Amino acid sequence: MHLGFIKKYVDEVFNVGLQNKLLLTGDGRTRQDPAKQYGTGGLMQGKKFMICATWNAPAEAFDNPDYNLFRGKGLTDIFLPITSNYRFCGYDIIDSYNCFDIFKRSDIDKDIEKYPAYLEELINK
């Protein structure tokens, strides 16, 4: 998906959530208490958010400074622009579920088979 579409979606959904006071009531700070921590105005406390993604990149390309593309960055770093929006609204961010090297590996079906168990584990935490 093109990043412009993601940005448009986020802007529209989160701005409606702000205007209707469904997701948040502001950024957490007030004129009376401007020192209150930015990003604490969310109303979604107790809700959880998770990213499930597929990658052509192999798993070893992440968190590895020897790989040029991500330059040592991990999935948490890469997903930060997405997860920050949800955290801003008060969501707890759950570890992502990722399928790596989807075009070159022949055992991608194993990742798909493991997904329900991963979700079950999260639910039972």
Image (spheres, grey):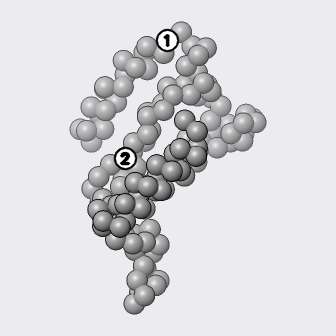
Q: Residue at x 43, y 39 (%)?
A: 51
> Can residue 97 be spotted in the picture?
yes
> Can residue 82 be spotted in the picture?
no
Q: Residue at x 43, y 55 (%)?
A: 12
Q: Amino acid at mark 1?
A: Asp
> Depth-wise, is mark 1 or mark 2 nearer the camera?
2
**117 or 79, which is in the foreground?**
79
In the picture shown, does residue 69 fall above or below 86? above
Few, some or many C-alpha atoms within 10 Å of disc 1 (few <14, some 14-19, many ≥20)? few
Q: Residue at x 48, y 15 (%)?
A: 108
Label 1 and label 2: CA atoms lie apart by 27 Å
Q: On the image, which quarter does residue 29 sit in?
A: bottom left
Few, some or many C-alpha atoms within 10 Å of disc 2 (few <14, some 14-19, many ≥20)? some
Task: Answer whether labels 1 and 2 touch (C-beta < 8 Å).
Answer: no
Q: Which mark is residue 7?
A: none
Q: Residue at x 27, y 56 (%)?
A: 46
Q: Amino acid at mark 2?
A: Phe
Q: Which mark is residue 49?
A: 2
Marks 1 and 2, the one that precedes in the sequence = 2
Percent position of residue 5, x then y: 53, 44
Taking the image as shown, residue 121 lies to the left or right of residue 31, namely left
Taking the image as shown, residue 66 lies to the left or right of residue 29, namely right
**Residue to which mark 1 is pinned:** 107
Q: Judging from the image, what secondary structure is the residue with disc 1 in? A: loop
Q: Judging from the image, what secondary structure is the residue with disc 2 in? A: strand
Residue furthest left in the image:
124
Percent position of residue 8, x then y: 51, 50
Percent position of residue 97, x then y: 44, 33
**37 or 22, which is in the foreground?**
22
